Amino acid sequence: MKHSARLADSLDVDTACVATPEIVEPLEPCKHLPPHDLFPLPLTAFEKFMLVDDHRDYPRTYTVLLELTGQLHQAAFETAMGEVIQRNPLLSAIVRKCHSRWHWTAVVFPSDEVRWGEPVTESGSLRIDLRKQPGFRVSGTTDGVNSEIRFTFHHAVCDGRGARRVILDWLTAYAAIMAPEQKHVRFDQLDYERLRRRGEFTRTPPRPKTELVPAEPVTLMQRIRTIYQFLSQHPTPLRTSTKLPRLRGRGPIEILSFRFSRSEVAQFRDRLRGSRIRLNDVAIAILLNSIAKWNRSHGESGSDRLYRILVPVDLREPSDQFLPAANRLSFVFITRHTSLCLDWPSLLATIRAEMDYIEEHGSQYNLVNALPVIQSVPGIVGAAVKIPICFSTAVLTNLGDTFRGVRRRFPEENGRPVIGNLQFVRAGGAPPIRPKTRLGIGLTISLGELVVQSQFDSQTFSPEDAAEFMRQFAANWQNWGNSTPEYR
């Protein structure tokens, strides 16, 4: 199993906009389309979990923001999006029961889900009922100088790598419309048969457990025991300084973000030179350390409190290179006590050991392995997700280098890929959260900078608390980069 672990960047460069043509030529008909017998397509165990664990105030949706310079052409935006939806069939599918099993079934994609103008940010409006509507919507805006596209996905449809496939396909389609003279800009030929096997994973045999990392459960009884152990542990949620009035539903979802400059990222990498530690290990460790310090400063006492970070793990193999947008991931859970969270050298060492083990052999707490056992009991998942306990303190996802797969296929100007009359700046987003998981953080790398984006639970976190936590989180990164005594 390979773990996806990279990080973020962005650079502001003034550029002149290319004139926008008044007439948009339609794309040539797609020569390689999904097979007619692809649907109905049974849901995987992970997709069924995402379907069930979808709360009204905590929708299992996430938004990726694509930022560009130049004036986005509305007709070209919409035409290119139609091509993307045609090439990635799960984007235009809904969920129905067929022979007592949930299946994806194809529908005509609603034209009003490709929007032009201001995007919707209310949490209730971001919820997508997959039984009635496809799990994808998108909006485009421009002020004539800069443009934004917001891609919103239901997590049952695809993961972050799947979202990257959608964005890459849209960039290719838009460039083909707006700059047809660029003959080298071509679509990848997607492998639709891989969609039928998206829930199948190969495994290397587990090795004996080490002092730092427990072995992955293999037998049914071992997995049942591990699930019980996981549920019996109650990680501590993030504390807040003020109790907010009880509201009916969450308010608008606000994404907070900050960026580390190219020189700061270079400093981070210099700190890791010659070691086996990766930047993703540092991100997990700094988040756990920041949470423990934050909670202690807000009244949490004792050294035995548990903090748990949910970390998505990419399960794609080389043969999945041309997989259409879909899920090929699992969740693993990194759990530490307060005492270890505040002991920086030991914390970082144990996280590197655990991530190393996960990359090779999987995790003791691996959602993909546990789900078939849990889902074998009718109704148990629906009941479990309604239990008012904290399953993880926070979510940390690494979206990787947003330029990967873009630079090699588009011309560049001032170091940025040119997409027709636009220039690519960055893409990133924050993962969805659930009840009592009050923080989701997404990391991306763009043009050498590390971009950190987050969303907090607005039912429990005030905007002031959210901003202060992120300020401390950024300061802890900088202290680690500067090798202050606390982080040596």
Image (cartoon, helix red, strand yellow):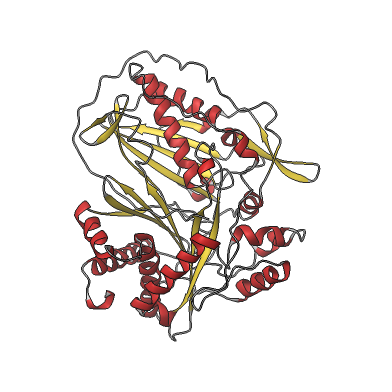
Q: Is residue 241 visible?
A: no
Q: Is residue 327 left or right of residue 98?
A: left
Look at the picture and state if 288 lies above or below 447: below
Q: Position of residue 15 (x, y in %)?
A: 20, 31
Q: Position of residue 449 (x, y in %)?
A: 27, 50
Q: Quadrant of the C terminus?
A: bottom left
The foreground one among 178 and 298 is 178
Q: Is residue 42 left or right of residue 60?
A: right
**Residue 263 found in image quarter:** bottom left
Q: Position of residue 336 (x, y in %)?
A: 47, 75
**Residue displayed at 36% across by 22% down:** 184
**Residue 197 found in image quarter:** top right
Look at the picture and state if 72 lies above or below 439: above
Residue lying farthest to the right in this orientation? 99
**Residue displayed at 37% across by 41% down:** 404
Figure label count: 0
**Residue 194 found in image quarter:** top right
Q: Is residue 372 visible?
A: yes
Look at the picture and state if 233 lies above or below 367: below
Look at the picture and state if 169 lies above or below 43: above
Q: Position of residue 210 (x, y in %)?
A: 52, 75
Residue lying farthest to the bottom in this orientation? 302
Q: Is residue 257 left or right of residue 187?
A: left
